[in-house]
Amino acid sequence: MEEYQLALFRQQCRDFLAREATPYISQWETSGLISREFWRHAGEAGLLGIGVDTALGGGGKPDYHYASVLTEELIQAQMTAPVVISHNDVIASYIATHGTAEQQQRWLPGLCRGELIAAIAVTEANGGSNSAELETTAVNEGTHYRVNGNKRFITNGINADLILTAVKTSEAQRGQGMSLLIVERDMPGFTRSEALKKIGWRASDTADLFFNECLVPAENLIGREGLGNLYFMGGMPRERLSISCVAVATAELMMATTLEWVKKRKAFGQTVGSFQHNRFVLAELDSEVKIARLYLNDAINKFNHKTLNVVDAARIKLWTTELQVKVADRCLQLHGGSGYLSDSLIGRCWTNSRVQTIYGGTSEVLKEFISKSMGL
């Protein structure tokens, strides 16, 4: 029964994206911004806040397989996926989990309807992977917090109405003085840069955020003061799992596209795919991508049973994103000059893939984290 429901949901996602995204993707990539109309329509279609309780406007589907299906269909539709995933993960991982009943009633219905757009702001010029190095401060002045500092490379930075912002509220050691505040659009002292120009995910509105004596109401604190790092650790498995879903879905799309290409493209009187070297390259990639899919499915099942820990999440994010970059490189090579065109599917996948080993924890940081878990 569950497989049938997932199949129905997949078709729902596919039909929606064909109607509401595909005709506009080129326009969004040129402007660097997905229209707010898309967000409202996605909310009406039940694609936002999939796991949020129906009483709060969500889909009431906490099974992560639904979120992974949406990700797969976003990738198949060649739509910029991080904007939707970031929005849904902020809802599911933080507001719905750590927000008060009043905060949930105030924000979740609008987020699920697509009337409000969410972002998460952690990275700064001098800190990101190490939250203890954050320099954005928030001073508790009773009825409000006075926030000062900057955030960099924030997905949904232009469109966002609610920004879950990591701030330093005390000088406690090892990141224990970090708290989470919801900064809302047009709060005094809050400004944004123009959209940053990136080499990939060009429809993802990414911006720097600036807080200059920004006054944030005390009731916008998520959870308890000083526990932000703990909340991030709790939300990290979902974030890294979502990035892994993008990695595997993109690798599968690139493989399917490349196989089709090498079977028809000819060189020296034979198809590109018939050369032994190319056959061996594709056989290796095919095996690794299929292993990654099994690894990902296992991680999703663990996440659903609340047994996917932060180390396991780091491992799968490291493995799948490094594989995605490898597949992108090899597949573009097999496409030759046609793959290097900016409007080719493999070219777009190649540029989109590169950031996957950077955000959500760089591969180098993940290796440090994993090795320490091994007692090294």
Image (cartoon, rainbow, N blue to C red):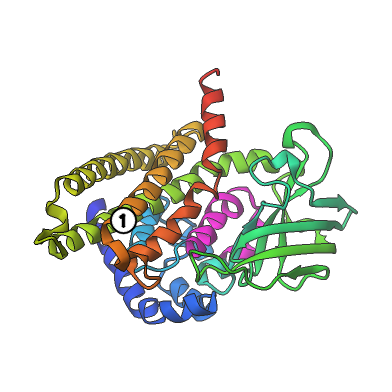
Name, please, the residue furthest toward the right.
Answer: 141
Region rendered in magenta? 82-108
Q: Quadrant of the C terminus?
A: top right
Residue at 45% of width from left, 35% of height from top?
A: 315
Residue at 49% of width from left, 57% of height from top?
A: 52
Q: Residues within 10 Å of mark 1 (few under 14, many from 20)?
A: some
> In the image, residue 330 lies at what x, y percent?
31, 51
Asked whether residue 227 appears in the rendered view, the answer is no
Asked whether residue 87 appears in the rendered view, the answer is yes
Residue 283 in the image: above or below residue 96: above
Would you say residue 64 sits in the magenta stretch? no
Observer-nearest of 353 and 155: 353
Residue at 89% of width from left, 53% of height from top?
A: 142
Name, please, the residue furthest toward the top.
Answer: 375
Magenta segment, prevailing SS (helix, strand or loop): helix
In the rendered view, does 207 fall on the left or right side of 5?
right
In the rendered view, does 232 fall on the left or right side of 187?
left
Name, please, the residue furthest toward the left.
Answer: 269
Judging from the image, what secondary structure is the residue with disc 1 in?
helix
Residue 27 in the image: above or below residue 275: below
Observer-nearest of 111 and 210: 210
Residue at 62% of width from left, 43% of height from top?
A: 232
Would you say residue 102 sits in the magenta stretch? yes
> In the image, residue 183 lies at what x, y percent?
73, 62
> In the image, residue 51 lies at what x, y percent?
45, 55
The residue indicated by pointer 1 is 333
Residue 7 placement: quadrant: bottom left
> In the image, residue 146 lies at what x, y percent?
86, 57
Name, please, the residue furthest toward the front.
Answer: 268
Observer-nearest of 170 and 260: 260
Q: Name the residue type under label 1.
A: Gln
